[in-house]
């Protein structure tokens, strides 16, 4: 099978020739550098090698909007299209970008929100997408990769601007305000995805959407509150995406078992991340409960097995995920999130080898 045939067969709940593979959020640079050294390759070679293993390629439009958005600064900070500023924060092993300014944190009225400059789909050149797809296919005509477009994170984009604590309070006590903001963000994503699908002319297979609604032990908000305040906006976006025939890959970390039925009703085709280290997240139960209606992407633990297990334990987990989640199709093998700095390179190598694609 080609990569696209492999992915789309699996998402049709049929078993392909081999379980599709994706690196998902990838490998953080220090871990990738250690892997390159372990495999006696330079960092450029390892990037090309890792890319060759995946059955999915990502595309997106070119930003042409205001120069004070989507911009990095000399101090390492970055301001995104929403006006959210992130600054570098270091731990013992890596640097991460953390939000340092929430631009809507002090705005208390809808009138103030109406005067804020929100992003517009006109800030993007969508004609870049078909060019990207053609370049992907030209590099390896035999693979015919599945093409994914992202990223529609409605609740997250809202609280990134508002601040998480403020947003939680708004959901409970300032519902009109919260609805205005969530609707505004949804309208942007609907326009964005619509423009992208029109430009791609049927060549996009997967749409990546997201909102972390689970923590380590439970949902971040109660299930009824999620059903009332967040789910309807994704349902609107998903309806439009499905009109273009694309499958919806929805990302959430954490303990989300309580929301599985709601996610299916929301229009999700593929549940992504699969943090089985979180409370109540069990691959066997998940497959039995929803495997006929929902496909899965991820599941190999970046929280425990990859960073702290042995190569043998990594191999065992990969094979178990394929056995359970890949039965009768419906599974794309991937890490549960980005593989973090400090993950032993021999474990990453064992993970890649267990996919059955490692030929070195």
Image (spheres, rainbow, N blue to C red):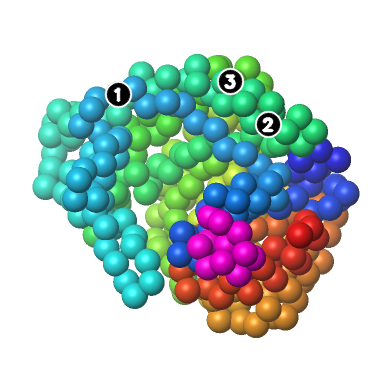
Residue 164, visible in the rendered structure: no
What is the C-alpha distance between the residues marked 3 and 2? Answer: 14 Å
Of mark 3 and mark 2, the one earlier in the sequence is 3
| Residue, disc 3 | 130
Image point 53% across, 61% down: which residue? 32
Task: Name the secondary structure under disc 1.
Answer: loop
- The answer for how far apart the CA atoms under marks 1 and 3 are is 20 Å
Tell me the CA gap for discs 2 and 1.
30 Å
- Label 2's element? helix
Query: Picture quarter containing residue 165?
Result: bottom left
Q: Residue at x 47, y 39 (%)?
A: 151
In the rendered image of this protein, does residue 151 appear above or below residue 38?
above
Q: Is residue 50 visible?
A: yes
* Residue for badge 1: 65
CB within 8 Å, label 2 to label 1: no
Ranked by sequence position, the earlier of labels 1 and 3 is: 1
189 and 51: which one is in front?
51
Examine the structure image and report whether residue 256 is included in the region drawn in magenta. no
């Amino acid at each position: 099978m080609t990569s696209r045939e492999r992915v789309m067969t699996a998402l049709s709940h049929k078993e392909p020739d081999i379980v599709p593979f994706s690196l998902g959020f990838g490998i953080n640079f220090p871990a990738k550098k250690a892997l390159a050294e372990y495999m006696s390759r330079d960092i450029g070679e390892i990037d090309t090698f890792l890319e060759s293993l995946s059955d999915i390629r990502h595309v997106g439009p070119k930003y042409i909007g205001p120069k004070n958005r989507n911009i990095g600064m000399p101090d390492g900070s970055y301001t995104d299209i929403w006006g959210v500023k992130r600054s570098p924060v270091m731990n013992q092993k890596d640097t991460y970008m953390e939000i340092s300014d929430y631009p809507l944190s002090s705005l208390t009225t809808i009138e103030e929100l109406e005067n804020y400059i929100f992003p517009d789909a006109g800030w993007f050149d969508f004609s870049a997408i078909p060019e990207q797809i053609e370049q992907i296919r030209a590099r390896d005509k035999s693979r015919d990769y599945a093409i994914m477009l992202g990223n529609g994170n409605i609740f997250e984009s809202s609280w990134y601007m508002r601040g998480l604590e403020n947003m939680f309070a708004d959901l409970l006590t300032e519902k009109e305000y919260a609805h205005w903001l969530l609707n505004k963000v949804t309208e942007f994503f609907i326009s964005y995805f619509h423009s992208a699908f029109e430009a791609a002319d049927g060549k996009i297979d997967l749409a990546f959407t997201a909102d972390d609604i689970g923590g380590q032990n439970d949902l971040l908000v109660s299930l009824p509150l999620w059903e009332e305040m967040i789910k309807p906006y994704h349902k609107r976006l998903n309806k439009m995406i499905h009109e273009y025939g694309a499958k919806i890959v929805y990302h959430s970390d954490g303990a989300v078992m309580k929301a599985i039925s709601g996610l299916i009703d929301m229009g999700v085709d593929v549940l992504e991340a699969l943090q089985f280290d979180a409370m109540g997240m069990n691959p066997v139960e998940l497959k039995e409960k929803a495997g006929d209606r929902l496909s899965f992407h991820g599941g190999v633990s970046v929280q425990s097995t990859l960073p702290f297990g042995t190569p043998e334990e990594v191999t065992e987990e990969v094979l178990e995920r394929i056995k359970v989640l890949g039965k009768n199709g419906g599974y794309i093998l991937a890490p549960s999130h980005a593989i973090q700095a400090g993950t032993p390179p021999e474990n990453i190598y064992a993970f890649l080898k267990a996919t059955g694609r490692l030929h070195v």
